[in-house]
Each structure stands twice: as structure tokens, then as C-alpha cells.
Image (tube, rainbow, N blue to C red):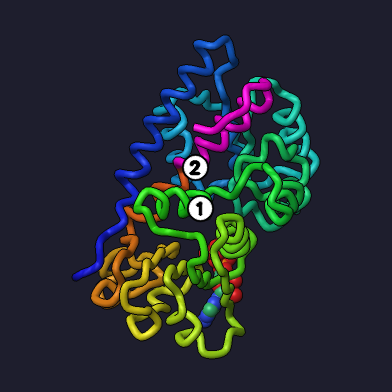
Amino acid sequence: MSAELIDGTTTARRVREDIAKSVAELVAAGGTVPGLATVLIGDDPASHVYVRNKRRACAEVGIRDHHRHLPADVDQATAAALIDELASDPAVSGILLQLPTPGHLDAEALLALIPAAKDVDGLTTANAGLLAQGRPGLRPCTPSGIIVLLDQYDVPLRGAEVVVVGRSALVGKPMAQLLLERDATVTTCHSRTRDLSAVCRRADILVVAAGIPELIGPAAVKPGATVVDVGIHRRDTGLCGDVDTAAVAEVAARITPVPGGVGPMTIVMLLANTLTAARRQQGMAGRP
Ligand code: ADP
């Protein structure tokens, strides 16, 4: 392997320490302790694990845990009433509705009840619109974590050719917009892109969020490129990403491993967003 590994675990730890310090400073300055309400509906085991990890991460930095759990058969009105209650609770700085919700519920309608100022996942129409217009707002955690990682490794963004594989509302689309904000030249690929490899080979920075195990091999990577792998898949042989890491590492200059690359950054950006939300709600602007 010749590529440098981009270490998300270490970077996330560093950012987490900064956040813990900033939370303590906010409280010392007379502010209210930031609080995150994770809302889990039903008993999906993977969602349970995700929510537990988020709650644990909050505790580590001094963010108060306002977790709420609703039964799988809860009706829309009850779930909506809970979001409304959290929306008007001043102790709750951020609200995170864990997706997917059970099939009988309208998740879009529930998300729409989250005030933009408490939307720490950056998923509401208001925050997506603010990002599209390049105005301040809460940004989705995975793409903003990737920007922090690229900055940490001094990967130049201005004028860089960046190819983003995937156009989801959660990752691909906001990723492209955040990179545009940083003056990169951005191409977005998706399931209908003709000759994916040829387009990817143009990239100085290749971000892959397609949800397909090892979609990207060395033939799709320009020598010396930086490769960011957002995918995570469980296989008999262990975890893998959307990139064939071992083979691509022979071509790329830098690559994020799976696990230990993008994943740890996503959670830490949720904490950063919760702190940002709390500060703005208390009229104490700024970022960690
Ligand atoms: P994520 O949550 O990681 O963004 P999604 O499953 O929501 O993943 O979205 C997958 C994205 O990947 C879609 O935008 C889709 O167009 C894109 N995609 C799927 N298959 C391919 C492919 N073969 N080549 C390029 N892009 C693809």
C-alpha cells in the first residue's frame, strides 16, 4: 500500500476535545448546557446502535442527552406531538429523528416539524435551501465531516477537480455544494452517468457515496488522487466501503479507510452542530 491513510478516528478525537472545551466555555460564560434530543421510533437493531453511539458521544463532550423512544406502532399525531414538544423546549438545542421510521409513518412530515435552528442533521428543506444559496445554516454531518478531514490533511480545495459519486440528499448533493462553497470544480456522478470510470479519473479528489460495495477500483482513480470513501458494508470477510481500498491505495496519494475514515467524523459533526445550534439560540455565535 502506498497511499497515506486519512485517519478519521484521530481527527474526530481532536475535534471532540475542542467541542468539549467549547461546551465548558459556553457554560462558564453563563450559557445553557447544549442538549440533543435523539428520537428513536421502533426497535430496528441498527438504529438502536446508531442512537446509542450518538448519545454516548454527547455525554463525552458534556452535551445533555434528551433521548426519546416511541413504540413501533405509534401513530403520526403522537410522533408529531413529541417533535412539537421538543421544538418548543428551550433545553433542547438539537433534534435528531433517527431514520428510517416505521413504514406507516410519514417521515418527511415529521422532519418538517423540526425548526431549522434545531435541525442538527441539516436535513430540513430550510437548511438544504440555505446551503444551496451559500447562506449560513446547519449542514449535514457526513459531508461537513469530510471537509474537516480534507482540511486536516491539507488537501487543497480551491480550483481542484472534485468528482462526487452519488447524489443523495444526505451526502452526495450537500457534499457537492460544500465543495463549491470552497471553490472546487465539482462534477456529480450518479446511477445514470455514462462511463463512470472515465469521469472519476479526472478527479484530484474523489468522494464516493453510492452505497455499492467496492464500486470504485484502481482503473477509476487518477494517480496521486485523494480518495474519500463514504460507504460501509458488512461482508463475511469484514467491513468494506464503496472503494476497493487495497487496490486503490496502490494508485492514490491519500485514502480514507473503512472503518476509521469518514464514519467517526459524522458523529463528531453532529456534536459540532448541536453546539452551534445552542450558541445561536443563546445569541452566542461562533464555531468550535
Ligand atoms: P448515500 O446515503 O451514501 O448517499 P444512497 O443509497 O442514498 O447513498 O444513494 C446512492 C447514490 O449513489 C444515488 O445518488 C445513486 O444515483 C448513486 N449511484 C447508485 N449506483 C451508482 C452507480 N453504479 N454509479 C454511480 N452512482 C451510483
Residue at (47, 34) in percent of width and height: 55
* Left or right: 79 as drawn, with respect to 253: right
Question: Residue flagged by tag 2: what amino acid is it?
Answer: Met
Whether residue 285 is in magenta: the answer is yes
Is the shortest distance between ligand 1 and the CB of mark 1 under 8 Å?
yes
Residue 130, given in percent of the width and then of the height, sits at 73, 49
Tags 2 and 1 in contact by the CB under 8 Å rule? yes
* Residue bearing the label numbered 2: 269
The residue at 59%/63% (across/down) is: 176
In front of the other: 41 or 36: 36
In the image, is 276 to the left or to the right of 264? Answer: right
Majority secondary structure in the magenta region: helix
Amino acid type, residue under disc 1 in the picture: Thr
Could you tell whether 126 is left or right of 197 in the image? right
Q: Residue furthest front?
A: 159
Q: Residue furthest left?
A: 1
Residue at (62%, 27%) from the top-left corner?
Answer: 285
- Is 257 placed above or below 219 here? above
Q: Which residues are magenta?
A: 268-288
Dot 2 or dot 1: first in sequence order is 1
Viewer-proximal residue among 263 and 189: 189
- Which residue has dot 1 on it? 142
